[in-house]
């Protein structure tokens, strides 16, 4: 009987240890989730001003490949455009000249088309210029951050030329995110970056 009581005691102790370990693990996980920093929008005021100007939500990238920063008024922004139809484009670029891996470019473009669901038309340019879809070469879908996008490998036009481009529709608007496929990046690398950028997007709604 004493041996049975001893075994029961050991079993109870082991059970308590397991419960304590589980509780500690859950506590650590909860603490990690609580302490995880929220994505921060670079110069949120500028993105808010854009949303207010076009009277539609915009997406702020909280992550771009180094050294780019998604600040519309920062040193890496080389294009901050709003058209009469309220469509907008934000372009961020880094370039370095040099032979081989000594040179390269990082170019990310975000666009928005309020109240539009159909892909716009662009001109190809040159002596045989013609009307074509601004985004073409559909190549499947990518979902991140609760956003399901269509991937277009091109030919894409204008500032999105030679880019892999993601397109999605939300709140009655159409949005795009694209990145240049050029050294030092391969196509697969660009797709990984686009997924990371898509995960980082923060929605900014108009307040005025």
Image (cartoon, rainbow, N blue to C red):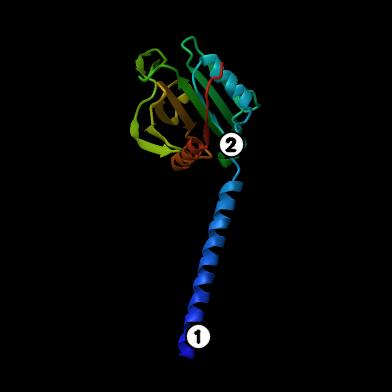
Vertical arrangement, residue 6 with respect to residue 88, above or below: below
Dot 1 alpha-carbon crowd within 10 angstroms: few under 14, some 14 to 19, many 20 or more = few
Give residue 103's mark: 2
Vertical arrangement, residue 106 with respect to residue 73, above or below: below
Task: For marks 2 and 1, give the one nearer the viewer.
Answer: 1
Point 58% across, 40% down: residue: 38
Q: Is residue 99 left or right of residue 147?
A: right
Q: Nearer the viewer, residue 62 or 66?
A: 62
Q: Nearer the viewer, residue 13 or 97?
A: 13
Point 46% across, 38% down: residue: 145
Determine which quarter of the picture holds residue 142: top left
Position in image of residue 47 (x %, y %): 58, 23
Position in image of residue 135 (x %, y %): 38, 24
Query: In the rendered view of the protein, which quadrant contains the N terminus?
Result: bottom left
SS class, disc 2:
loop
State which tag comes first along the sequence, 2 or 1.
Answer: 1
Determine which quarter of the picture holds residue 173: top left
Q: Is residue 40 visible?
A: yes
- The residues tagged by marks 2 and 1 sit, at their Cα atoms, a distance apart of 73 Å
Q: Disc 1 designates what residue? A: 6
SS class, disc 1:
helix
Position in image of residue 70 (x %, y %): 59, 30
Q: Nearer the viewer, residue 4 or 130?
A: 4
Position in image of residue 153 (x %, y %): 38, 32
Q: Is residue 161 visible?
A: no
């Amino acid at each position: 009987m004493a041996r049975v009581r001893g075994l029961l005691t050991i079993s109870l102790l082991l059970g308590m240890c397991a419960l304590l370990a589980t509780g500690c693990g859950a506590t650590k996980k909860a603490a990690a989730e609580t302490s995880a920093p929220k994505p921060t929008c670079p110069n949120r005021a500028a993105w808010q001003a854009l949303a207010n100007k076009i009277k539609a939500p915009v997406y702020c990238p909280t992550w771009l490949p180094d050294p780019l920063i998604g600040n519309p008024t920062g040193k890496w922004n080389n294009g901050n455009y709003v058209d009469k139809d309220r469509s907008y484009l934000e372009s961020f670029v880094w370039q370095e000249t040099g032979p081989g891996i000594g040179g390269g470019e990082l170019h990310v473009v975000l666009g928005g088309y309020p109240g539009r669901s159909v892909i716009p038309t662009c001109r190809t340019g040159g002596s045989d210029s013609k009307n074509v879809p601004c985004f073409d070469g559909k190549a499947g879908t990518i979902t991140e951050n609760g956003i399901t996008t269509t991937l277009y490998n091109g030919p894409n036009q204008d500032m999105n030329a030679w880019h892999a481009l993601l397109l999605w529709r939300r709140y009655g608007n159409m949005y795009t995110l694209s990145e240049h496929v050029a050294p030092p990046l391969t196509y697969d690398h660009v797709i990984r970056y686009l997924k990371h950028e898509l995960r980082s997007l923060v929605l900014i709604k108009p307040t005025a």
